[in-house]
Amino acid sequence: MQFEQLQPEVQQWIREAVSNGHPPEAMVDALVHAGHPQTISHAVQQYLSVLQAEGQTVRPHSSSVVARISGTQHTSDRDVQILMALNAPRVVLFGNLLSHQECDELVAQCNSRLKPSSVVNAVNGSYDLHPSRTSSGASFRRGENALIKRIENRISELLSIPVSRGEPIQVLNYVPGAEYKPHFDYFDPKFSGNDKILKMGGQRFATLIMYLNDVEAGGSTVFPEIGLDILPRKGNALFFSYANDNGDLDALTLHGGSPVVAGDKWIATKWLRLGDYTGPQA
Ligand SMILES: O=C(O)CCC(=O)C(=O)O
Ligand SMILES: [Fe+2]
């Protein structure tokens, strides 16, 4: 079924739904529910491809991750709360993902191995120090010890993503004045420097930031394109996703860590790939 063959009012409905950021599968569900045949999904896809060919941003459909929201998500060793959810872009704030003791243990384990954080150079693929990122970090090999294993398994159950698709957990420390300027976590395939990193498990599609302490002042995670500001709270975790299986990327997930004003800030980050991660520390 072609988009042009649809009645004008149906075409208009689809245009508006797309510009409001509705995920395509939700649109198709609504159209089928209203009596249209399932093949209307082809017309929706065709419309989206045309927009993309014209260079317009098409928001990726929310992946199946946390598709159904209920107040509490059960994992085998912990009940995790959903504190906030946004559909487009997909952002979910979890409460109680980590116990305070787990947060403290993670910080204690990495204290002796903190190094200044680097960023990937999109031109040549090297890991460079950069003034846009002034934290220090330490990274933990997947399954490195009992604590890391437990946290990785819990994340995998919570998000229904195999552990094999996760990058190593990175713990970051920001002292007053330190920040991570707004950036994307995905690797733009337009830059050849990203080729190598994309071969190690495909595109990143989502990020989980775990907050390991309460920050005295500043240090929130900010999304400037959508005016969202998430305050660090010990044990909470912020999930956001930005790529679908076709590799469409959502530029609304531009985000950063705002400068810490007082106290310091500790987070642990788990990035997730579309395929099995095979890079360093897998
Ligand atoms: O510090 C933050 O809140 C954001 C961290 C971040 O964006 C990242 O680690 O990729
Ligand atoms: Fe980030």
Image (spheres, rainbow, N blue to C red):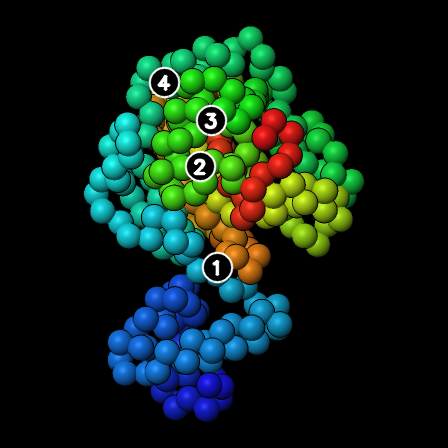
Quadrant containing the C terminus is top right
**Amino acid under label 4?**
Glu
Q: How many marks?
A: 4
Determine the residue positioned at 33% across, 25% down.
98
Image position, residue 55 (x, y; %):
61, 68
Determine the residue positioned at 42% across, 76% down.
41
Question: Is the residue marked by circle 1 packed among few (<14), some (14-19), or many (20+) residues within 10 Å?
Answer: many
| Mark 1 or mark 2: whose residue is earlier in sequence | 1
**Amino acid under label 1?**
Pro
Residue underneath mark 2: 208
Mark 1 or mark 4, which is nearer to you?
A: 4
Q: Secondary structure at mark 1?
A: loop
In three-dimensional space, the C-alpha distance between marks 1 and 2, rounded to whole angstroms, equals 18 Å
Q: Secondary structure at mark 3?
A: strand
**Amino acid under label 2?**
Leu
In three-dimensional space, the C-alpha distance between marks 3 and 2, rounded to whole angstroms, equals 8 Å
**Amino acid under label 3?**
Ala
Determine the residue positioned at 68% across, 36% down.
120
Residue underneath mark 1: 60
Image position, residue 38 (x, y; %):
37, 78
Q: Are marks 3 and 2 in contact (CB under 8 Å)?
A: no
Determine the residue positioned at 61% across, 73% down.
54
| Mark 1 or mark 4: whose residue is earlier in sequence | 1
Residue underneath mark 3: 268
Q: Residue furthest right?
A: 124
